Amino acid sequence: MSTTVQQPDGAAAPAPAPSRTPAAKPARRPRPKGRATEALMGKVAVNGALVLVTLYMMLPLAWLLIAATKDMGGLFGGDGFAFEGFHFTENVKAVSTEGDGVYWRWYLNSLLYAGVGAALGSFISVLAGYAFDKFDFPGKEKLFGGVLLGVLVPTTAVALPLYLLASKVGLVNTFWAVFIPVIVNPFGVYLARVFSAGYIPGEVLEAARMDGAGEIRTFFSVAMPMMMPGFVTIFLFQFTAIWNNFFLPLVMLSDQKLYPVSLGLYSWNTNAHAYPEFYPLVITGSLMAVVPLVVAFVSLQRHWRAGLSAGSVK
Amino acid sequence: MNTSLRAGRRRRKTTAALFLTPFYVLFIATMVVPIGYAIWLSLFTEKTSGLGFGGTRRVFSGFGNYADALGDEKFRDGFVAIGLYCLLYIPVMVGTALALALLLDSALARARRFFQLALFLPHAVPGIIAALIWVYLYTPGLSPVVELLESGGLHWDFLASDTALFSIVNIATWEWIGYNMIIFYAALQAIPREVVEAATVDGAGPVRIAVSVKIPMIRAAVAMTMLFTIIGSLQLFTEPSILSDANPAVGSSWTPNMYAYSAAFRANDFGLAAAASVLLAVFAAALSFGVTRLSSGRRTA
């Protein structure tokens, strides 16, 4: 891997992704001289297989959507994939009022952990990635090797040591215990370096320097705007990772008021074994927690595609 | 001119240091120091003095905690469970993702954008919620899937002791197929079209081209995905924890990570928990080092 990483050249950068949409080149490969029926069968087989897998992928989400409209009776009796009575608004109301509206507290916490954490974290990653790409300094590749090592160390393997350390310094069960560790994103630094190489031509920086702009000014007024698509990509992935983070809050937090949604739903699910009326709460609460991410991924398609290509195409 | 050039270079070095500082301060504080502290803690053990009066004392025990962890059958079983899990999960997940990417890349596929989005969406679902949904879908009485199978005359108990592995692999596969499919698809799109056209002219069919032209050309992406999948598998925690509520066969220390968690929070044995975490991190690092060496060695050969 190190051989490929050390030269994040422009060719591998994700910038040209939008123009390479497959739809734009309909007849890219000459069709073999087979009979028309054979081609048709091939088409049916290929698309049929894709439809089948898509159905499998959509099944749990469809069930979640339908189940969120049901009350207790509807959940445990009747057809799982049929609408029976419409209790969605009651379910949302129940989710909102349970435990004095603690769910929205969790939601707000998640927005803080994920929104502010990812914004700050992506900015720090972009700073570091830009420095790695555009500046020369002694020990550069060694330092970057440390970043790559950070990508490879399992995050949950660090969570427990983090807990032990946090309990030593008295940060356990505080907002900071979850917020500070999630800001660090070694993979974001790696992506930022690739994006910086792809989006910012060295000549532009030279021109800014010729005009007498300082390095910091150059970064903020020239480089940062050019890297904006990369920033959004890193932000999106980090936001998702923090929103989905479960192990770190589980280890760090005991005060329900500090929980993110993921941990809150987990605690409700634990209740559901003894009190089945928690099932509709968990289901509707899960749907409400998934919606922002689905909306983000549907509306920011270009960015996650670019991020995944940058991380792999080499 | 020369002096101003040198001044510029020095200024750039200062700026680089300034830009790198926030990341490295946090990186050291949240990764390097905790791991160092865990190594330190793992060398001690808490001893209750006398009859339990007077609290506990911390005693240096050398590699005692490591010996305890490695000597504990439950901890070793965790690695066996992960090994079995990988044997089933990696071929199924990586194989399906690769097959889907090849299907999408074939000239016959329609609605490529829609399929990519639909297949990727499960990855946007938090792991804990994915596990909850699937466990509900495994639960008889709640699940339309179990019902459907029953009505078709198929009896499949997702929560039996011998189906636990399958049930966990299914959840993880659902979460990760789309993500890796996109990675493979992006790599496939980067293959020069002339290569594929040349093979077509030579009379190779689409399956033959996929197997002997396209897959070898995206070997690097496949190797990297394998690496990240193995690292991810080693930290397996969420899915089996959720399933363990519904399936007693999945115990509280089913994976090494769950073992470390129980050691810390059920037995309050921080030394043992630290030792287990360190062993897991070392194992992961050694494995990823081995895999990268292997794949990069092959590439240069």
Image (cartoon, coloured by chain):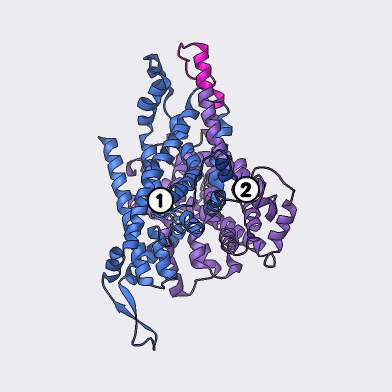
Chain colours: A purple, B blue
Q: Does the magenta stretch include residue A39?
A: yes
Mark 1 burial class by Cα count in 10 Å: few <14, some 14-19, many 20+: many
Towards the viewer: B71 or A99: B71
Question: Residue B56, image x and y in percent?
Answer: 37, 83
- What is the chain identity of the residue bearing mark 2? A
Which three-letter amino acid code belongs to the residue tagged 2? Leu
**Is residue A232 visible to us here?**
no
* Residue marked by disc 1: B233
- Residue B248 in picture, x, y percent from top left: 46, 59
Q: Mark 1 lies on which chain?
A: B
Q: Residues within 10 Å of mark 2 (few under 14, many from 20)?
A: many
Residue bounds of the magenta highlight? A22-43
Asked if residue B250 lies left or right of residue A227, the reply is left
Q: What element carries label 2?
A: helix
Judge whether residue A181 can be spotted in this image.
yes
Image quadrant where residue B42 sits: bottom left
* Nearer mark to the viewer, of 2 and 1: 2
Q: Is residue B296 magenta?
A: no
Give the answer, above or below, for where B250 lies relative to A206: below
Q: Which mark is residue A64?
A: 2
The kind of residue on which mark 1 rests is Ser
Question: Same chain for marks 2 and 1?
Answer: no
Where residue A257 appears, as percent x and y from the top left, is 61, 68
